[in-house]
Image: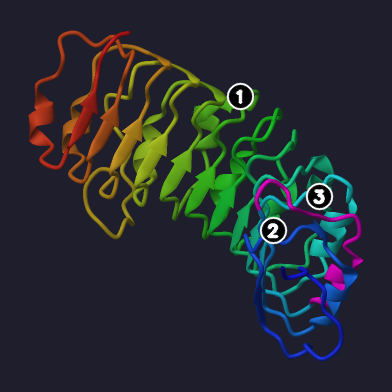
Amino acid sequence: MIRATDFYHGEENLQYLSLSYCGSSGAIRPSLGNLSNLQFLDLSSQSYNFFANDIQWMATLVSLKYLVMNHVNFSMVGSNLDEMLNKLPLLIELHLYSCQLFDPISSLSSTNFTSLSVISMSHNFFTKFPVWLLNLNSLVSIDVSYNQLEEKISSCLGELPNLQYLDLSGNKKLTGSFSELLGGSWKKIEVLNLASSNFFGTIPNSIGNLCNLRYLDVRYNSLNGSLPEYLKERKNCSSEGLLPKLRSVDLSNNQLAGKLPFWLSQLEELTYLNLQQHPSRPYPCFFGNVSKLAVCVIRME
């Protein structure tokens, strides 16, 4: 069996190392820090086979661009993790799925890894959204789903100029006005997943500004009122029409009511629509105009 992270002098030129799901287990050894030219590191494990009790070695991996440590147990590291990550100035992707992480990683006051594009920290125990992410204009993808977020999410998320993917789903105590959240520009957003959270209020007509949106999931929230009769339409979209790229919409299991608006029939790329528990009677006949629609759920339980 490979003894993961048992590295000494002689491998300094190594740039790519993946020991993911290789059957190794135990503590991550400080000798891993000898790989000063490493650009890609994946230590993902099953059932927390790896754990970390000392991560000072991470500070020497200054060439690291991709760090994947899913299912590595960081519960004994505490606040040291965010301090070490901040010493990796070239980091582009960070994947920390289900790592027994708590709130200290949210405490960074400034960030040095200004090239960070992808961050995935789902299935941990954060109660606060890492606000330092709002300072990273390079971000394309943020996944903090299935944590224990409680505080209101800042609408400044919508001002991240390159953000395409946002997943806040599964944070049942996460609350805030849905219309306020959409108050930003959201210039490049393609995937917006807020399912199983506690957003409230109405769906604003400004949602029509999200001309790059492909996937919208706000099921199991506390949205109420009617869908807007008309949508705003951003004039500088690369494609014409209302929400021209939207393919999947799930608004089910909210408190929405009222007549379904005609603009739903103008979503040319729509393939999936779920309005379960929307008390619309009679069912609108115009869905036959949506030629690509494959699944349409409109029913009361």
- The numbered dot on residue 74 is 3
Q: Looking at the picture, tell me which residue is in the foreground, 294 or 159.
A: 294
Amino acid type of the residue tagged 3 in the rendering: Phe
Instruction: Report if the CB atoms under discs 2 and 3 are less than 8 Å apart.
Output: yes
Residue 178: x %, y % from top left = 51, 28
Label located before the other in sequence (1 or 2): 2
The structure residue drawn at horizontal position 67% and vertical position 83%, both measured from the top left corner, is 15
* Magenta residues (range): 46-61
Amino acid type of the residue tagged 1 in the rendering: Lys
Question: What whole-number distance in Å separates the C-alpha atoms at marks 1 and 2?
Answer: 25 Å
Secondary structure found at label 1: loop
Q: Mark 2 = which residue? A: 69
Residue 16, placed above or below residue 113? below
Q: Quadrant of the C terminus?
A: top left
Give yes or no for residue 52 being in the magenta stretch.
yes
Question: What whole-number distance in Å separates the C-alpha atoms at marks 2 and 3?
Answer: 10 Å
Q: Quadrant of residue 173?
A: top right
40 vs 295, left or right, is right
Q: Quadrant of residue 284?
A: top left
**Nearest-to-viewer mark from 3 and 1:** 3
Residue 39: x %, y % from top left = 68, 78
Residue 5, placed above or below residue 243? below
